[in-house]
Image (tube, rainbow, N blue to C red):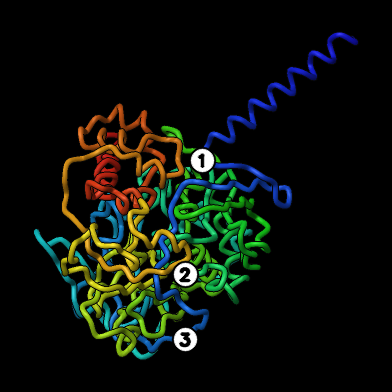
Amino acid sequence: MKKVVPLLKNEFIICLSAYFFYISQQNVSISIKNMSKVIKVKKGLDIKLQGKAQKNIVNAERAKLYAIKPTDFNGLVPRLAIQEGDEIKAGSTLFFDKNRPEVKFTSPVAGKVVTINRGERRKILEVVVQAANTDEYIDFGKSKPADLSRDEVIHKLLQSGLWTFIIQRPYSIIANPTDNPKAIYISGFDTAPLAADIDFTLQGFENEFSMGITALKKLTEGKVNICLSEDFSASKAFTDSKDAEFHYFSGPHPTGNVGIQIHHIDSINKGEVVWVVKPHHVVSIGRLFNKGIYDVSKIIALAGSQVLQPQYYKIIGGASIETLVNDNVEKNNLRFISGDVLTGTKIPSNGFIGHYDNLITVIPEGDHADFLGWAAPGLSKYSASKTFLSSLIPKKEYKLDTNYNGCERAYVVTGQYEKVLPMDIYPVNLIKAIMAEDIDLMEKLGIYEVAEEDFALCEFVCTSKIEVQSVIRKGLEMMIKEMS
């Protein structure tokens, strides 16, 4: 035994040294915080923009118009349940999914359906509701989720329309209520440019959030995982949640993306399903059980370099942004975005906030040419590749517009994607496999783990100006069709 023990000790030391060497070569490092793993992401990019919202909450003036947009939902084929002129209550069904009629999309306010906007081939783009002065709600019944069965919780979520807030990975589509996910994930922080401070927006909603977590716990035999930032103290809404397991992250964007978090906690394999919910939607789920109504009021941030008073507003989901931006933006050629600048959707100044968004961004429209282009010194220009002198001022905030600074060109392998995507996959190879429509290769390269938002920075730094997020969505749609 005296000869064996030293040998085992030496082998242990060798194995431990090899393990730490392996960790040092990866794009994450692991430490311990309150007996939980802290995953420190090294790859990524923080884009510092001017116009961050000040922590001041204003009760926004009630909008005259509200809309639910089928275009907010991937893979949806909508079928109308109403027609123009119908009087409705908050919680009334506006349309449903043709392929899954039990998945309903409901009105955020009481009022009258005034417009059904259509696009090419009569595709439904918006169902617009003129709001009444006060809301009359459909009563879905109060209940304690802890006392209900899984099927009863699902039924209540489907009937109210709140099921649409539960997103499935893979594919980033509305979850299938017949699935049994291996886990549910909630990202408790957002690292996107000018993103709303989630801890701040949840203040005062601790009870609703806790009840929402209890309801979500009923939907999975696995864990409800809440991912938090190591760099900031978490909101009581998170820390008081008893039915959840916590994970801590640190690092640049896209560390706050739930897809990146899932990848580092327990990556998705073929045949597996996880569900994803945003924190402000957990609050709405909690309200459903607490009040028995479809209440999707939320705190959003209005931010961007062209906003005169960037701050937080309390609104009802689906509201027109007209009352928020009137006399509160510079009178220039502007781009209004529902969401952040990397993944958001362009909307008009009287457009409607997206179903999943808690941020409105306003930046200059990029419809001009720069004198000398990249050859100028560029003290006020931003470059991910540190081309300009501005890279010598790391904390500088920028006023960026929507200029592409070039057009689509030959696809060149530069290694830029790998610097900003903290996932153990080959991004360029995956994109090429999608372009070639090679299903087998897409599977091998990790198509089940990704969504458009995870590749947003790849699109931002792409020297070939490829619309990477559109390519990823095309790949996901191909996989849905292949697996159906």
User: Does dot 2 land on a helix, a strand or a loop?
Assistant: loop
Residue type, numbered disc 2 = Ala
For marks 3 and 2, give the CA distance: 14 Å
Q: Nearer the viewer, mark 3 or mark 1?
A: 1
Closer to the chain start, of discs 3 and 1, is 1
Sequence order check: which comes first, mark 3 or mark 2? 3
* For the residues bearing labels 2 and 1, Cβ distance under 8 angstroms: no
Number of labels in the image equals 3
- Label 3–label 2 contact, CB within 8 A: no
- Of 6 and 105, which appears nearest the observer? 6
Residue 203 located left or right of residue 161 = right
Say if residue 131 shows up in the picture. no
Looking at numbered disc 1 in the image, what kind of residue is underneath it? Asn
Q: Position of residue 432 (x, y in %)?
A: 25, 35
- Residue 58's disc is 3
Q: Which mark is residue 196?
A: 2
Q: Position of residue 28 (x, y in %)?
A: 55, 42
Residue 445 in the figure: left or right of residue 86: right
Residue identifier under label 1 = 27
Residue 266 image-quadrant placement: top right
Of labels 3 and 2, the one closer to you: 2
